[in-house]
Amino acid sequence: MAEEAFASSYKPLVRFKLVARWFVNCCLIFLQVGILSVYYIFVVDHAKEVLPLENKMKHPKDMDGFNGVLSTGVSLVTLIYAACGFYGYITYGDQVQGSVTLNLSDTPLNFSVKCMLLCVVYSSFLIQQYPIVEMLWPMAKRPLRARNTKRAYITAFEYLFRFSIVFVALGLAWLIPNLDQIIPLVGVTAGMLLALVLPAILEVVVFIEEWRANFTTLRLSVYVGLDCFYAILGLFFVVTGLQANIKSLMQGESS
């Protein structure tokens, strides 16, 4: 999307289309690997899976709407998360940890809840992995096809590629002892860039010619000003968030 945005903009910006594509892909990969690594402790929004899955649907229009797949799924998930947070705090109070599942004891009832959580993680891990594979595997497969590699070898290499992604995610989750301090780093960097900074920049890059042709100077200034405000606001959150998280990490290590 970023590559197409720069490709359809002013000629001086066309040469940066590959840079924009790689930058967005790196942010997505960093965000997704971070989610895979800490998936056992917390869950965040899954907007990065929505567009690839919508493009693969037989009837993409079913994704939107009042009773579409997206609105229905998000509503149910929101109610479940709100109920878990509400009843978890009522049960454990100020002793509640980063995930309420960490407060569960080894009683038969709580053990059954942990088993159900294990099934959820096992069945949905591939969905989290899907965007990374969709972005990286075509590039990794291109040299193999250029060398006329047998299909069996390509399939074996794909399984090895997927296994390496899982291994990296699990390795990070195992090596980092305090995930509650690392989690904000993922959101405040890649998450904030994808949520505020890049959409504002891409909107200006794509629509600036149309705005100049159809809008008055005042309206053009308002649109560009809003996008600049969102981008600056996002960069401010990135800088201040990084500063606060690094300070928190240093204090945690010293204590």
Image (cartoon, grey):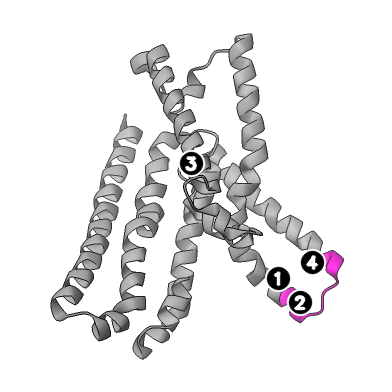
Q: Position of residue 140 (x, y in %)?
A: 67, 69
Q: Earlier in the sequence, mark 3 or mark 2?
A: 3
Inter-mark Cα distance, 3 to 4: 37 Å
Is 62 left, or right, of 65 in this rendering? right
Q: Which mark is residue 74?
A: 3
Q: Position of residue 208 (x, y in %)?
A: 29, 79
Magenta range is 143-154
- Work out which residue is located at the far top of the displayed protein and give it: 107
Q: Amino acid at mark 4?
A: Ile
Residue placed most toward the observer, 84 or 55: 55
Q: Which residue is mark 4?
A: 154
Q: Residues within 10 Å of mark 4 (few under 14, many from 20)?
A: some
Inter-mark Cα distance, 3 to 1: 34 Å
The answer to whether mark 2 and mark 1 are in CB contact below 8 A is yes
Inter-mark Cα distance, 3 to 2: 40 Å
Q: Earlier in the sequence, mark 3 or mark 4?
A: 3
Q: Label 4: state its secondary structure.
A: helix
Inter-mark Cα distance, 4 to 1: 7 Å
Is 3 left, or right, of 152 in this rendering? left
Q: Amino acid at mark 1?
A: Lys
Q: Which residue is mark 2?
A: 145
